[in-house]
Image (cartoon, rainbow, N blue to C red):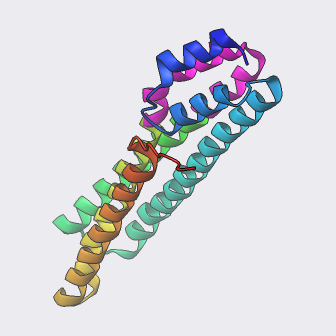
Amino acid sequence: MDLELQEFAEENFNPPLNNLEVCSYNMVQHNSNDEIFNLYLDDITAIFDSLFGFASTLGAFQFVGIIFEKSVVENENELTKVSYFCLSLGFLFSILGAMVVFLSGMYIRSLRHEKIKFALASIKKYSKLFYFGYITLFINSAAFLVPINLLVHELLDFQYAIVINIISVVIFITGVIIYCILMLKRQIFELNN
C-alpha cells in the first residue's frame, strides 16, 4: 500500500463527508492499484450516468408537458400560467442538471489517465460542484411536481386534488430524507468481531 497515498486520504477524506469521499477513502484503504482505481472511477461514473438519465427523462416529460398543455388548454387562467412557469423552470433545471452531471462524469472519466493522488485531489476539490448536479435534480423534481399539483385542481374535485397534493409533498420529502440519510449523512459503523 502506498504510504504517501494513505496519508493523503487520511488528511483529506477522513472522516468522509459524502459518498464520493467514502468511495475515495475506501479505494485507498484497499490497496489502491490501477485495477482498483479504474473500478472506483467506473463506479463514480455510473452514478453520474444514472443522474444524467434521470435529468434527461424528467426534462423530456417537462417538455412534453409544456407542449401538450398549450395545445389542450383553451383559456389561460393564473393557475395555468404558474404551471407553465414551473414546467419551464423545471425544464431549464433539467438542462442544467443534465449538463452538470454529464460534464462531471466526463471529467471523472478523464481522471483514468492521471496519477491516483491527482485524481483524488481533483475529486476532493470539485466534490461540491459534483453535488450541485444532485441539487439541481431536486429543484427540477419540485418544479415538475408543482404544476401537476396546480393543474389537478382544475381537473378533479377539491378533496381529491388536496389528497394528491398531500401525497406529492410526502413523496418528495421522503425522497429528500432518503437522499440525506444515504448520500449526505456521515455514516460511521463499528463492526464487532
- Judge by depth and name the residue closer to the eye, 12 or 85: 12
Residue 58: x and y in percent read 50, 58
Apparent side of residue 169 relative to residue 55 in the rendered image (left or right) = left
Question: Measured along the vertical axis of the image, is residue 66 above or below residue 161?
Answer: above
Q: Residue, x 61% and y 50% (percent of image)?
A: 50
- Is residue 108 inside the magenta stretch? yes
Q: Residue, x 66% and y 12% (percent of image)?
A: 3
- Is residue 12 inside the magenta stretch? no
Q: Which quarter of the picture shows residue 163? A: bottom left
Please report the bounds of the magenta region as a residue range: 104-131
Residue 79: x and y in percent read 20, 67
- Judge by depth and name the residue closer to the eye, 22 or 64: 22
Residue that sits furthest to the right in the current view: 35
Q: Quadrant of the N terminus?
A: top right
Question: Measured along the vertical axis of the image, is residue 6 above or below residue 101?
Answer: above
- Judge by depth and name the residue closer to the eye, 85 or 93: 93
Q: Residue, x 29% and y 70% (percent of image)?
A: 170
Question: Measured along the vertical axis of the image, is residue 127 above or below residue 85?
Answer: above
Apparent side of residue 166 relative to residue 182 in the rendered image (left or right) = left
Apparent side of residue 96 relative to residue 25 in the rendered image (left or right) = left
